[in-house]
Image (tube, rainbow, N blue to C red):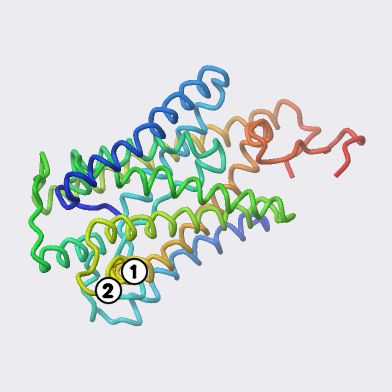
Amino acid sequence: MSRRALVNVLLVLAVVALFAIPLLLDGGASEYGGTDAAVTEDLEAGGYTPWFESVFSPAGEVESGLFALQAAIGGGVLGYVLGRLRGRRLAQEKAAPGSPAP
Amino acid sequence: MHIAEGFLPAAHAVGWTVAAAPFVVHGARAVVREVRENPESTLLLGAAGAFTFVLSAIKLPSITGSSSHPTGTGAGAILFRPPVMALLGTVVLLFQALLLAHGGLTTLGANAFAFAVVGPWVGYGAYRLVRALGGGLLPGVFAGMVLADLATYVTTSLQLALAFPDASSGLAGAAAKFLGIFAITQIPLAIGEGVLGVLLFRVLTVNARPELERLGVLRPAPATTAGGAA
């Protein structure tokens, strides 16, 4: 494994650790409620009533599915672009083997 | 950072929509111009939009026992300058408002102002500052991503404080309350986003060098021709 690839793997592990360690330390004690929802609860407790409803409110399971869809579209496009760029570089290196990328 | 549908008083909703609209229109023009003048940018533009799309879909747990979204708007702001993100960020918010009941149409202006205008500009400013002080690309990207994220949530807190000042402690008290809900939770998320941004740019510097040089993110490499001053 090249040094560049190793550093990339370590960066991925660092991100995973950043979010996994609080989860592990916590041991399932917290609800992990969203901060957005915390604000609406606070405002409603203060007597505020929203004056407009969402035009479309998916049920819980459908909502998580749609969030997953959003992530999948983003991840898919990102992967497609990065894959194309990498393929382009490899093709260029094959065509002109004299100038390897740094 | 999504202020929920109907949760801003009408005057504030209209005000933020009016404030955000010119940025979004200007951003739409910037995107069209970029694609027309540099069709080869389309791929990277797609990557920048996709990056925000993924990151803002994911709710991540934080040390505070609550969870929140990263924003991912810093990457596109660094690559294509902030106006482009005003459009791309608003598209993301619109998707979430219409399909996910997350955020809303009445609060779209305020959310766009925080997520698609202030965040990208602050992130871009931080990136430029690091580069101007002699920092490398990756430290600049890290600072830009982290601050774009944090600035978005600070803006949301201030917007809420402006709409709901505390009865006794006023604007400052309300700002402290909303920052208390958002800001600390957001710090590890912002750092994680910074690391992901560094990863993205490490991959791009290898595979999209010509684009990054054209966009001015990387200086043209003196590589094989021995003449360029390093």
Residue B82 spot, x, y in % from top left: 50, 39
Q: Is residue B116 left or right of residue B126?
A: left
Chain of residue at mark 1: B
Neighbours of disc 2 within 10 Å: few (<14), some (14-19), many (20+): few
Residue A19 spot, x, y in % from top left: 39, 68
Identify which residue is drawn at 81% across, 33% down: A98
Q: Is residue B16 left or right of residue A76?
A: left
Quarter of the figure that contains the N terminus of chain B = bottom left
What's under tag 2, amino acid-wise?
Ser
Q: Are marks 2 and 1 in contact (CB under 8 Å)?
A: yes
Q: Secondary structure at mark 1?
A: helix
Chain of residue at mark 2: B
Residue A100: quadrant of the picture: top right
Compared to residue B35, the image places residue B57 above or below, namely below
Residue B55 spot, x, y in % from top left: 38, 50
Q: How many marks?
A: 2
Identify which residue is drawn at 22% across, 61% down: B164
Neighbours of disc 1 within 10 Å: few (<14), some (14-19), many (20+): few
Farthest residue to the top: give it.
B36
The one of B83 and B162 positioned closer to us in this rendering: B162
The one of B109 and A79 positioned closer to us in this rendering: B109
Q: Is residue B216 left or right of residue B108?
A: right
Q: Which residue is mark 1?
A: B172
Identify which residue is drawn at 64% across, 53% down: B129
